[in-house]
Amino acid sequence: MGRSSRQSDVSAKEPVLHIGWREWIALPELGIPAIKAKIDTGARTSSLHAWNIEPFRRRGVLWLRFDVHPLQRSQAKTIRCEAPAVDKRNVRNSGGHVEERHVIETSLRLGTYAQKIELTLTDRDQMGFRMLLGRTALQDGILIDPARSFLVSTNRPPIRRKSAAKSVL
């Protein structure tokens, strides 16, 4: 059976970006200069570890104020974030249970790659990664190498545990 024209077009494209199964990313609009993310093509939407989520109104628009621990397995550093709420959705978590989550939109930076993405906010404190980067955040032309890590972000950014973090991404 022959290939469809769409399959031919997609396979003929050169990857825009070659990334590993985990990468350091930045969420500059949230004031997060670096957070280790697991690339999860099994997840449709990306999710961010957030706690102390407080809905509030700003000029009639629903916003969310929340805290993020950007360092894996550490609560030493906390970043307070604010973003307009985009939606509230039912999402199936890693345990197979459906939970309602707030959704925000923010900018993602991975090396020179930048894009607006949707993020669900959830408590990922007991999970291995503070952030999952789902497949809707990955546009055409991104190639994921599941056997390698940190292909774009080769060095761990120097995040200070008590003072403000500096972006190196």
Image (spheres, rainbow, N blue to C red):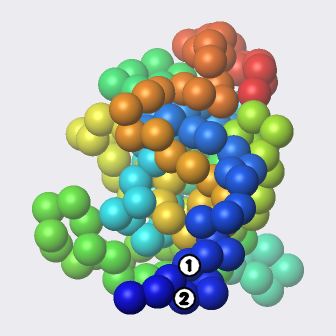
Q: Name the residue under label 2.
A: 4
Q: Name the residue under label 1.
A: 7
**Residue depicted at 57% across the width and 39% down the height:** 19
Kind of residue sitting beneath label 1: Gln
Kind of residue sitting beneath label 2: Ser
Relative to 147, is 87 above or below? below
Q: Residues within 10 Å of mark 2 (few under 14, many from 20)?
A: few
**Residue depicted at 34% across the width and 25% down the height:** 73
**Residue depicted at 46% across the width and 19% down the height:** 76
* Mark 2, secondary structure of its residue: loop
Q: Is residue 7 left or right of residue 168?
A: left
Q: In the rendered structure, are the residues bearing label 2 and label 1 in contact, judged by CB atoms less than 8 Å apart?
A: yes
The spot of residue 3 in percent (x, y) is 50, 83
- Can residue 159 be seen in this snapshot? no
- Can residue 39 be seen in this snapshot? yes
**Residue depicted at 75% across the width and 27% down the height:** 169
